[in-house]
Image (cartoon, coloured by chain):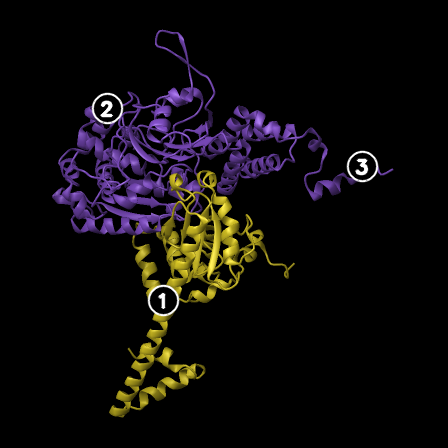
Chain colours: A yellow, B purple
Amino acid sequence: MSETPNAIDAITAPVSSPGEKFFPKFEVTPELTAKAQELVALYPEGKEQSAVLPIIHHVQEEFGYVSPEAMPWIAEMCKSTPIHVAGIVTFYPGIHRKCPGKFHFRVCRTIACALAGGEELLPYICSKMGVDPAEMTDEEPMVVSPDGLWSLEAVECLANCGFGPNVMVNDTLHSQVTRGKIDEIMAACKKELAAERKEAAAAKKEAAAARKEAKAAAAAAEDTPEPVAEEPQKPAARKTPAKKAAPKKK
Amino acid sequence: MSDITYKPGKEPHPRETRRIFRNIDREGYDPSIKCFMKDGGYETLKKCLKMEPADITNEVKKSGLRGRGGAGFPTGVKWTFIPKGNTKPVYLVCNCDESEPGTFKDRFIVHQDPHQLIEGMVIACYAVQAHYAVIYMREEFPEGAKIMQKALEEAEAKNFLGKNIQGSGFDLKIVLHRGAGAYICGEETGLINSIEGVRPYPRIKPPFFPAAIGLYGCPTIVNNVESLCQVRQVMLMGGEAYAAEGAQRSPGTRIIGVSGDVKRPGVYEIVSGSITYGELLYDICGGPRIGRKFKAIIPGGASAKVMRCDEILKDRNPDGTVREMTIFDVPMDLDSIAKFGSMSGSGGVIVMDDTRSMPKVLNNLNRFFAWESCGQCSPCREGNPWMYKLSTRICEGKGSPEDVDLLKSVADNICGRTVCAFGEACSWPTQAFTTKFREEFLALTKPINALKAHSAETAEARKFLTRED
């Protein structure tokens, strides 16, 4: 008996997804806690539990999905229990238990969009993303591409019925979508990613330069104890110290 | 009105009367408070804050304004349901969950004119003396949530929200609460549970009428976005002037969202009862696409009963004679369509032309309801996937004629046996489609299918019944 996981363990078991590499891993930081407390403060006193959905939304925005490790923390923040949070997370279709891709496509397939041809878009998007449409089931309506860049979810009504088919990419709604428009959207996404990567590379370079400068300044001041104290903390990070050490000095 | 220009291609149709949608797609209009106030925004609120709260409620009652969320309950009457001598705090919740397929009016208000809603909410809160209000917005409006949050901050900075609003001594805090994609949160008690941070199972009525026992066990008024905007309109025009316009039993304007097979789908604001379905679909929406004919209309969001376009409807004239008409002659108010067994609901009109297969349309709706059932009551939780399974089987050509009757009987056994109105919402489409388009369903079935096993398990169980010689 003890070897078979119970239903709750099965529900909260981690699901790995290639999308994870585009999001930071769940980690409790002072900023995160402060944000959660701010959200709790919106509700009347003694009703901390009301903040469970706003906190979940915030976690999802930051980390892409609600991981099993996040649930006990959310419970602690809104003075609830982890199982209660698990109950909420499993109820709503808008809360992900699996990390979506960098660009999350939500395709409406409810009546008005279906009449406009929304369902016919699904196989096309699947082929463009390189995912198998058969993977999309009622239990797990979201599929993530192997490179983690794309994810696709068939959803119910996005409330823009007159202008179907509707596709939502991350936070932006695209209406009257055709195959050509899908190509355009995906090209724009790729452009955005390239720009982001370029920016990140530039930031990395800048950080490296800043570190060099700081090092030079430190050498000039002959203030040796600080770098010595810092170095043993991160022995593994030696190969690329520029990126990781620089923000610490700021 | 003549000084307003609209964006090219977005001009209102001459038969429209833009009140709530006055600023939608307007040239040079943005959702900022500056734009809204330049147009006389928040003046009504200032006027209302000088009145007695009970007078506002009376004015709204006098106007005959009915809720625009679907049920059409008189808004002013709802407000008076707060128990007399109540000592608990009163809450007001704005239902911006808009998840009925076919309805997409609130999206425009939230994205383009959020201050109109805030002003309406402050007036309503003042009338019921609520000092804490929640806008429950659906998760699918992430941009709308940002716009609304900014609008709330702007309104607070100008003292239209917060402490001692405009020196009247009235305090109000409005919180924006986002849902997470569940249809059931549009049900008022489910919505309240969602705000409380528990699973949004609807509560049983009685005793859980929100006006008596609502959010945190306190009296709570739940109003739709459009209703709250109409409250502002009532106070702007005066109750009697509002009541004088449009259909007698449902005055004012209505926002109609048209989707499906028409030339010009979209949202239109019309005076209630001033036009018929035919005028809406042929004049305003441009009629069916070239070479096609209208076949069926769902008049009030996905859960309303479908109407056949060639069906002869019989209505009684005031002098007692019987008049024959079709759906195209039915006026667009809240009650007329109810006489013919459907409902006008939240104003989402879905149109299908003669190229559509009705069993397929029903199958799509059944999938929606099977997916969105919250799972609290067994008839709905089990019945919806069953109906979906049956309609899929019929669409795939594996059904037998008996399956059509079974489909209807499952629906008949859901409605009226659940805690909330979802039971009715999910069974009405199936009941209406299978009755009104029975021949289409039967055409897809074969009698021999009744003898066939539909799953591997059934085949396995039946193998001993098969003679092998």
Q: Quadrant of the C terminus of chain B?
A: top right
| Chain containing the residue with disc 1 | A
Q: CA distance from mark 2 to mark 3?
A: 71 Å
Residue A76 shows up from this direction: no
Q: Quadrant of residue B128?
A: top left
Secondary element type, mark 1: helix
| Chain containing the residue with disc 3 | B
Q: CA distance from mark 3 to mark 1?
A: 67 Å
How many other residues sit within 10 Å of disc 3, few (<14), some (14-19) or many (≥20)? few
Q: Quadrant of residue B244?
A: top left
How many other residues sit within 10 Å of disc 1, few (<14), some (14-19) or many (≥20)? few
Q: Which x, y percent locates residue B283?
A: 33, 27
Q: Which x, y percent locates residue B378?
A: 55, 37
The amino acid type of the residue labelled 3 equals Thr
**Residue B243, labelled with which disc?**
2
**Considering only vertical position in the picture, is A3 above or below B435?**
below
